[in-house]
């Protein structure tokens, strides 16, 4: 008995392993990577999907944003990619250029439920590289003005300033309220905010041929505008490490520019100002641009279960599911139909939809991360007053030309 | 002869295999990559990388940002190392005083920052140096000094990082110095006492020279560590600082490799860092060989 026990155990193990793998073969397991807030909430939608598609199970892996780029990079370089993943819009160009992503045009052509037209155009543009769609927009993100309705009403603004001149006037009045009272909370080193003002002046980073165009008047003037905001102390170069929402609640910095998720954070962290804040469109100069971002869903070229992955994408793109997602994760749906449905019930979503339509997507090119870094540095130099706006732009032009000449 | 080595080799084999795969091979492979233009196009199709010889290195020496990073890193090392040596020696001398109560408590307390996670400590430090809400500026205000904006002012951002690193290492270096201090024979101090030496003279002529091996060890390790500064500026100043004043060489390597996918360029910059550290270490070792101890 003693001698045959190990043999029996081994046979049992063998039988167990073969039967479980055999069972697994009839059920497809699609592996999905999701990050941040989305990763934490997508689990709520997956049972619905699995119920609608009995042969498919979804295996979710949640990855923190801080590690996302590295994880994706190592997976691609090492060939250990999942079937599909959530991918930030600013990562798209590099991964598509590397040849890691599946071209989704054949899937779109065959699909009965999903068309690129279903989505806001500036969103779909983010996932098109070299003319081919490599990703389907999942949710959109852009930057909005969040402001204290009561404080602005006190200084005479019942609605948020509509034009640049009104905005500057409003800032002056806000700063005149007293010592340690400022107007707008924005970071000089964050292009996702500073570029809004520069784009709003009708400027562009690259011209039609893809060459850097940052010494054009519209761009230089835009940089000068932003630098002035800091020079006049409407915004602070250093907010002292304080919390953007606490400053909003205390009234020290009653305007800030942030992503849509800030609304949820305001509701949870500063409930004392519920009903006293709202969202507005960026003030208009030539247009009301706001940086367009968000995340899409991509299928890897080396994925093994592409059909199953595509079905999950179709599911997540349905307008009702997009709205459910909005409620679960607090994000902005990329689907036009979902946005229209949401605008009908919620005035804030109506503003969101208007801003989305004025969104500007940064150029979807692999050089973008380097360009981002240079933009941040040079715009900062102008804001700190270390260089004049013109000097900063000329140096930026040289930086960008060097970057663009690489590939 | 051969049979004698077979058994030990077999025992060592697993370790050696791991070290070869994960340390030795990557080191030489990255040297090879630094001679190619491995970038985003080569990520999936490795064959796309072309051999370009020393072109990456030439480009690096003309890269304004890279030169700035070298400058930042050197500035950091020049500020950090002397400060760390002087302060930790002072701390060790204080802790060595015979009449200190709760000595163990102090030693543990000072050692704690060193063993804490670097990212966690940096996050706490971020709040300590906050301009309006931080403890540091609050304490400075007691002396009537208006605290600057440590992390947003290009003149002071590096000081905040030096402060953090020195504070963290104080415990460890003081501990090393304490051990060194125990090794100094009491008779030397007694003899000096008889000759009428003051405390200052005792420290200058007995303590410091006899601590020379410890000082050399601390300065080599802190210089090597200083050149590789990465986690603290990444957490405190988001990988760049006001106008890149806190961007270090390792941050440059990381950014180019993992954000811009320019692996060839990044590998070349890491070899330049290697050359720096190598040269500095050789100089210090030569220095040690010339030291006359007694």
Image: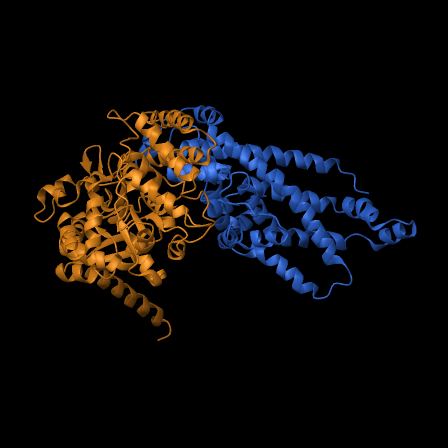
Chain colours: A orange, B blue
Q: Is residue A298 above or below residue B185?
A: above
Q: Is residue B166 above or below residue A27?
A: above
Residue B182 x, y percent position in the rendering: 76, 55
Residue at 38%, 47% (x, y): give it: A174
Residue at 39%, 40% (x, y): give it: B258
Q: Of residues A353 and A334, which is closer to you in this image? A: A353
Residue at 34%, 50% (x, y): give it: A155
Q: Quadrant of the N terminus of chain B?
A: top right
Q: Is residue A249 left or right of residue B252?
A: left
Q: Is residue A6 left or right of residue B160?
A: left
Q: Is residue A61 visible?
A: no
Q: Of residues B265 and B151, which is closer to you in this image? A: B151
Extreme residue in the right direction: B195
Residue A306 x, y percent position in the rendering: 18, 47
Q: Is residue A164 visible?
A: yes
Q: Of residues B185 and B15, which is closer to you in this image? A: B185
In the figure, residue B204 lies in which quadrant?
A: top right
In the figure, residue A370 lies in which quadrant?
A: top left
Q: Of residues B51 and A280, which is closer to you in this image? A: A280
Residue A354 x, y percent position in the rendering: 19, 45
Residue at 83%, 50% (x, y): give it: B199
Extreme residue in the bottom direction: A1
Q: Is residue B214 left or right of residue B14?
A: right
Q: Is residue B35 left or right of residue A407?
A: right
């Amino acid at each position: 008995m003693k001698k045959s026990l190990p043999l029996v155990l081994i046979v049992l193990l063998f039988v167990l392993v073969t039967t479980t793998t055999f069972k697994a073969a009839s059920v497809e397991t699609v592996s999905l990577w999701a990050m941040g807030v989305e990763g934490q909430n997508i689990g709520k939608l997956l049972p619905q999907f699995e119920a609608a598609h009995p042969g498919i199970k979804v295996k979710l892996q949640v990855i923190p944003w801080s590690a996302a780029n590295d994880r994706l990079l190592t997976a691609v370089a090492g060939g250990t990619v999942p079937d599909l993943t959530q991918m930030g819009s600013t990562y798209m160009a590099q991964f598509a250029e590397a040849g890691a992503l599946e071209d989704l045009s054949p899937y779109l052509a065959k699909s009965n439920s999903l068309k690129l037209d279903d989505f806001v155009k500036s969103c779909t543009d983010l996932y098109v590289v070299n003319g081919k769609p490599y990703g389907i927009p999942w949710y959109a993100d852009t930057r909005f003005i969040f402001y204290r309705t009561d404080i602005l009403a006190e200084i005479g603004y019942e609605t948020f300033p509509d034009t640049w001149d009104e905005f500057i006037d409003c800032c002056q009045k806000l700063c005149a309220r007293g010592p340690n009272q400022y107007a707008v909370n924005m970071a000089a080193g964050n292009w996702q905010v500073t570029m809004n003002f520069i784009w709003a002046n009708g400027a562009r980073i690259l011209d039609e041929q893809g060459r850097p165009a940052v010494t054009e008047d519209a761009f230089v003037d835009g940089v000068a505008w932003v630098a002035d905001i800091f020079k006049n102390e409407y915004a602070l170069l250093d907010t002292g490490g304080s919390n953007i929402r606490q400053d909003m609640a205390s009234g020290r910095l009653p305007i800030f520019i942030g992503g849509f998720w800030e609304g949820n954070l305001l509701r949870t962290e500063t409930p004392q100002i519920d009903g006293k804040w709202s969202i507005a469109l960026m003030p208009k100069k030539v247009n009301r641009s706001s940086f367009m971002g968000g995340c899409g869903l991509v299928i890897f070229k080396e994925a093994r279960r592409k059909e199953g992955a595509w079905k999950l994408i179709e599911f997540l793109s349905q307008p009702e599911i997009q709205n459910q997602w909005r409620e679960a994760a607090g994000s902005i749906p990329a689907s036009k139909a979902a946005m229209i449905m949401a605008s009908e019930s919620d005035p804030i979503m109506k503003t969101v939809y208007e801003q989305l339509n004025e969104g500007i997507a940064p150029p979807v090119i692999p050089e973008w991360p380097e360009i981002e870094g240079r933009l941040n540095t040079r715009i900062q130099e102008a804001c700190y007053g270390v260089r004049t706006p013109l000097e900063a732009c000329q140096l930026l032009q040289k930086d960008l030309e060097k970057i663009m000449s690489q590939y | 002869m051969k049979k004698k080595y077979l058994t030990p080799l077999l025992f060592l084999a697993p370790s050696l295999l791991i070290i070869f795969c994960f340390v030795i091979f990557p080191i030489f492979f990255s040297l090879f990559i630094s001679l190619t233009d491995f970038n985003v196009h080569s990520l999936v199709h490795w064959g796309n990388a072309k051999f370009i010889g020393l072109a990456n290195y030439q480009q690096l020496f003309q890269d304004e940002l890279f030169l700035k990073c070298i400058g930042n890193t050197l500035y950091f090392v020049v500020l950090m190392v002397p400060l760390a040596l002087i302060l930790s020696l002072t701390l060790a001398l204080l802790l060595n005083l015979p009449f200190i109560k709760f000595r163990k408590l102090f030693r543990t307390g000072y050692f704690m920052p060193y063993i804490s996670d670097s990212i966690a400590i940096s996050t706490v430090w971020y709040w300590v140096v906050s301009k309006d809400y931080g403890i540091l500026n609050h304490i400075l205000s007691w002396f009537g000094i208006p605290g600057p904006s440590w992390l947003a002012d290009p003149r002071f951002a590096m000081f905040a990082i030096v402060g953090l690193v020195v504070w963290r290492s104080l415990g460890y270096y003081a501990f090393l110095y304490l051990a060194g201090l125990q090794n100094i024979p009491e008779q030397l101090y007694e003899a000096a006492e008889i000759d009428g030496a003051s405390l200052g003279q005792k420290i200058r002529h007995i303590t410091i020279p006899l601590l020379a091996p410890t000082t050399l060890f601390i300065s080599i390790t802190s210089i090597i560590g200083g050149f590789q500064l990465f986690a603290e500026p990444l957490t405190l100043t988001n990988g760049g600082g006001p106008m890149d004043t806190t961007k270090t060489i390792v941050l440059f390597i990381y950014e180019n490799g993992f954000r811009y996918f320019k692996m060839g360029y990044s590998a070349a910059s890491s070899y330049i860092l290697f050359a720096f550290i190598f040269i500095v270490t050789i100089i210090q070792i030569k220095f040690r060989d010339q030291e006359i101890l007694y």
